[in-house]
Amino acid sequence: MGIFTKLAQQIFASVDETGNPRTISEQEVGVWGTEVEASLNNLGQLLSASVVRGTKAELDAVVSDYEDGDIGLVVLDPNTSLQGVYEKAAGIWVKRSGLPDAASAQAAQAAAEDAADDAQGSADAAAISEYNAAQSAADAAASAIGASPPVALTGLVGSRGMMPTGFQAFTQMNSRTRHFARDNINRVQFLFGNWYFSTGESPGLGNMTLTAAIEYPKGRIIPLQWSTNPSVVIGPGDNAPLTDPAFVSIPDGAEFWVRTFMTLAEGCTVCEVKDSVGGDLAEYGSGELTDKSASGTITNSASQYYCYGPLAIVGETHKPSILILGDSRNHAAPSAVHLDAQSNRGNIAHAIGGQFGYINCAKGGSTMAQLIASHTRIVALKTYCTDVVIQHGINDISAGASGATALSSVDSIIGYFSDKNVWTATIEPYTPVSSDGWTTGGGQTVDASNPQRVIYNDGLRAIRSGVKGNFEFADDVESIRDSGIWKVADSGVAITSDGVHLNDNGHQLADNHGSIDPRRIYRYPEPVARWSTRDQWEKGESALSWLSPNAINRSRLFASKSADQTGIAAASSVTISWQNIDMRGGYFDTTNNRWYPPKGKYRVHSQIMVTAGIEDNQIAIMRARQPSGIVIQTGMRTKNTSAFSISVDKVLEFNGVGDYIVVDLNITGTGDKTVSGNAAHTYLEVYAV
């Protein structure tokens, strides 16, 4: 690879090439050790990289997405002098070193892709093996204490699964839709479809060619594949197969994005749910667009609310997964239905979208009769769901259906999901006529269909056969039950702007009442014994759990810096100072930067990154001291003027009386040195073992 002057087997050989005894050269050992340290430092920079780009220009284009101290890699720039490891400092990328083996472009590219993709794709056998091993270890740990491992089911792990609801004349669309993790995600797949529901299920107008990617965190994009292919063709009326698993770690509650590029010559299949305020993006074209699913900035097209996203975001979850059925009160255009801060749209999603993954199959203007006439594709989505919530029927009733007919229709729909937990919700008033903008009850004209709505709601309250329960939503927003009159908020504030849908004030009122309560949907298994952490114990979260006595008394320290430490004189031992102290037990002397832990055995690990004042071929020595003297020491030789990291790691005994730990740095040469204040690069951690 060209990294080492000589290999270890040559340096430490007891005989020479002719078989004669030889003496190991201390000079050769020193050179080899320095080269090992430099290689490990470079490898550490590779593995800690926040962003990888082919060229320096591409890295510069995303500089605003990263923080000072983040590491970036340039791996394939035609100008080889620009290839290397960069650190963001003072708002720009500053080159710190070359790549570990820049002469081998293929090796550098492979390393960069491995670091950037984070074991992406089903072809990455190592990642799959690691994932399965972790799952097996967790199950074994549970079995060891006599508990059953928690059962994870395949379900929905992201919010805003979206059903297409129409088509448009443009033939290309780049789209970026926002979603939120609704369980801890480690492995995720996506379902995309080429059909829509308008007045019934309809196939897309032609073959759709689709590429897609997941973006998490912001700016880090992982392309999706189908059986290792980078794109998929979806026939009219079909769903694509689930994407290959994407291995990405997203914590419960975190925001991520799905990026797609669609080409459909006869006119694009669209979802009418774009939330431009929340961060959704979509641009439309007919031949002029380039594929931006894997890179590039998507420019929002006017104020239109068309976009395209996944029908389902699928993974392993311990939570319920929800399918929503309804009309405009759970879908509609952005001007009609409130979107919350996480882009959840409509009555049901607004109430449960912060807790569960869901697919919203509501369509403005639709009726239960239309759904009964055409429902095959929607019902098939129950594969990924545990629960179905139905709030439907106002369009049937306002168009003349009787309450009894509406109840018969909802019974038919309930029957499609007999293997699921089905919930219903009462429907709010339909009062499209008001003389004063719905600011008073007296100004509203009760619609002639209201008696049928009353019959329908009473039937839902009685709990239909095959239904788990009913949510009493109508009472939240109706002046009194069955009145057909909308409530008016304090000071004469209207909660509807059209007598048909809630406005933002109305949704806030419904939120405050909370009749659609996610806690009713949760299913709580019988408690089993488990181990708890100290943090859980301290927060009172360790009921029905086992807590190791050692965990209660476990002391620890994590110290970092709040800023760079400058003015470190050459050829002298300088104590590293710490400003950010997070500790449990013991005492920290801020004047002398010493931690005095309770009596016991501790692992001491500290790392320092030196970023400025570095000279070539100098000796850097890092020491950890106790009162008795130096207890850990590491040395290395600097190479060029590149930033470098040095660390110490050892298990030590402390007497609990006067023993402390303090960290020093000594670098030969001339001029002052600077130690990075980035907590990811310079820190001291000590914990009881």
Image (spheres, grey):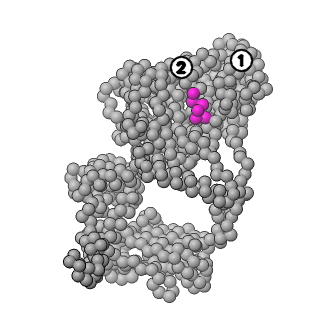
Q: Residue at x 47, y 32 (%)?
A: 241
Image quadrant where residue 385 sits: top right
Q: Nearer the viewer, residue 167 or 510?
A: 167
Image quadrant where residue 648 sits: bottom left
Q: Position of residue 203 (x, y in %)?
A: 48, 20
Q: Which mark is residue 408?
A: 1
Image quadrant where residue 200 sits: top right
Secondary structure of the residue carrying numbered label 1: helix
Q: Residue furthest top?
A: 400
Q: Residue furthest front?
A: 19
From the image, tell me which residue sits under label 2: 201
Q: Is residue 396 visible?
A: yes
Q: Position of residue 71 (x, y in %)?
A: 37, 58
Classified by dominant secondary structure, the portion drawn in magenta counts as helix
Q: Residue at x 47, y 82 (%)?
A: 631
Residue range corresponding to the magenta coloring: 380-385
Three-letter amino acid code at the position of disc 1 = Ser
Q: Residue at x 69, y 35 (%)?
A: 516
